[in-house]
Amino acid sequence: MVYSMKRRFFNLKPKPRIDMPEKTIEPKRTLKPSFAYLIEKKREGGEFTNEEIRQIVDSIMNREMPDAQQAALFMAIFFQQMSAQEMADYADEMKLSGDVIELEHIHHPKVSKVSTGGVGDKTSLVLAALGAAAGVVMPGMNGKDEDFVIPTVTKLSSIPGVKVKYSIKDYENLLAKTGCAIVEQCPEIAPADDLIYTLRQSTATIPSIPLITGSILSKKLAEGCESLVVDVKWGKGSFIHDREQAKQLARTITRVARSLNRHSVALVTDINQPIGNCVGTALEIREAVALLNDEKGLEPQPRGPNGEILDPLFDLRELVLKLGMEIVRLAGVAGSTLSARQTVNKLVKDGSAFKKFREMVIAQGGKVDWIDNPDKFPKAQYVRKLPAPKRGYVHTIDAGKIARGVQVLAAGKDGKYDPAVGITEIRKVGTQVKQGEPLIMIHYNDEARMEASLQYFRDAYRLAPKRPKEEPLVVERVA
Ligand code: URA
């Protein structure tokens, strides 16, 4: 069920009182503060009232505030921050700039999983199916991402026939039928955020804690979730490069969500290197399907004699396990940490999560035989290795540079991705390599593009004589 608030169309002016004289003295001041006043107020560190935030959102929606003043205002917010109350008001007003989905007629707990976006991260694909297999409805509208991150809907679209554009009604039907859906965000959902996000991209104001908090919460609240699991990424493969800032964001989102009556849990996770063993559109679908079909489940796999990691999916497995546990616990499907762990593990091991993924693909019109037999996905014409320039241990991989390299390989001028290309067999941090051994395998269709991508891939790798200290994947849990 959708209800439309669209507050901007409401006439907020008080009705004239009957005993008022027809003509009153001309007001000296307008009721609404000027945009310049609002900019100045924030520039000086002031706190906006709810009415002022409503005015800002409404005037952006109505195209009343000139771009220059919007840019100045968001830059002022970037530097001066917002209070928790301002962020809650901002998220709520952005939510009310469009339609709000109510899923009360679907009698299951509804938990949204959202990530701030990371390279090679295919957990949303796996978790949509895993959560739904556990009896949780998983709203899954895919909003904006950093330009170097391949959106989850783009990955899903590499399955022939899959449709990702739906009306709100049809999206609700998908959720009612299957329990999960991965679709493009409907334009009616938090349209103010769409306008503001575009402005932020062109004004270098994306990495702002209040603005990210408002942006994520407005969309998720409008999407129909009751609670929220947030993966806050920090590192080179995200727009948040600082671990402390990511922790701050995790704390802020959970706090503001609570004030808006939503339970949430945030995990702060490392995305300095890509997640999993590949980056690329269809390649990532195949990896998600491989994990869903993995009878080993989600538990950590045995290591080598020197403690070295042998499992190529170790980090994807861990991330799905940890986020999946939060989903089933927030939904109330599992009470304790132990039972949450057993639940999500079982759903992968016994094939229920894979079955749900198939159902989702069928419901969205996709050719499910490609999921049953992933060899049907188109393969790139050529594969070549990126050789290690010397022997040593992989010390760091800059996931941002990897993503840029894959973008050069894959993204056409029309914004479409070549689904077949990307990288696989990523030698992860801590792996020992000999000179000339592959660091990654590059799948490509165009020689010139491949040549152009090489510099990014070479620059992404740093080798060192000693094995680096192992960093935790999940660095903090905030509830
Ligand atoms: N993801 C969002 O949805 N909004 C932001 O502002 C940043 C990441």
Image (cartoon, grey):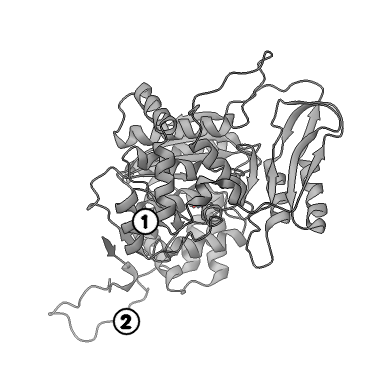
Q: Which three-letter amino acid code belongs to the residue tagged 2? A: Glu
Q: Residue at x 37, y 74 (%)?
A: 30
Q: Which residue is mark 1?
A: 49
How far across and how far down the image is residue 7, in percent? 31, 67
The C terminus is located in which quarter?
top left
Q: Residue at x 32, y 73 (%)?
A: 9
Relative to the observer, which residue lies in front, 352 or 300?
352
Q: Which three-letter amino acid code belongs to the residue tagged 1? A: Thr
One can see residue 305 in this view: yes
User: Mark on residue 26?
Assistant: 2
The answer to whether the residue labelled 2 contacts the one labelled 1, judged by CB atoms less than 8 Å apart, is no
Nearer to us: label 2 or label 1: 1
One can see residue 249 in this view: no
The N terminus is located in which quarter?
bottom left
How far across and how far down the image is residue 237, in percent? 64, 43
**For residue 42, side relative to residue 8 (left or right):** right
Q: Residue at x 29, y 44 (%)?
A: 261
- The correct choice, above or below, for 133 with respect to 170 in the image is above
**For residue 170, side relative to residue 316 (left or right):** left
Residue at the far top: name it: 305
Q: Residues within 10 Å of mark 1 (few under 14, many from 20)?
A: few
Q: Looking at the image, tell me whether mark 2 or mark 1 is earlier in sequence order.
A: 2
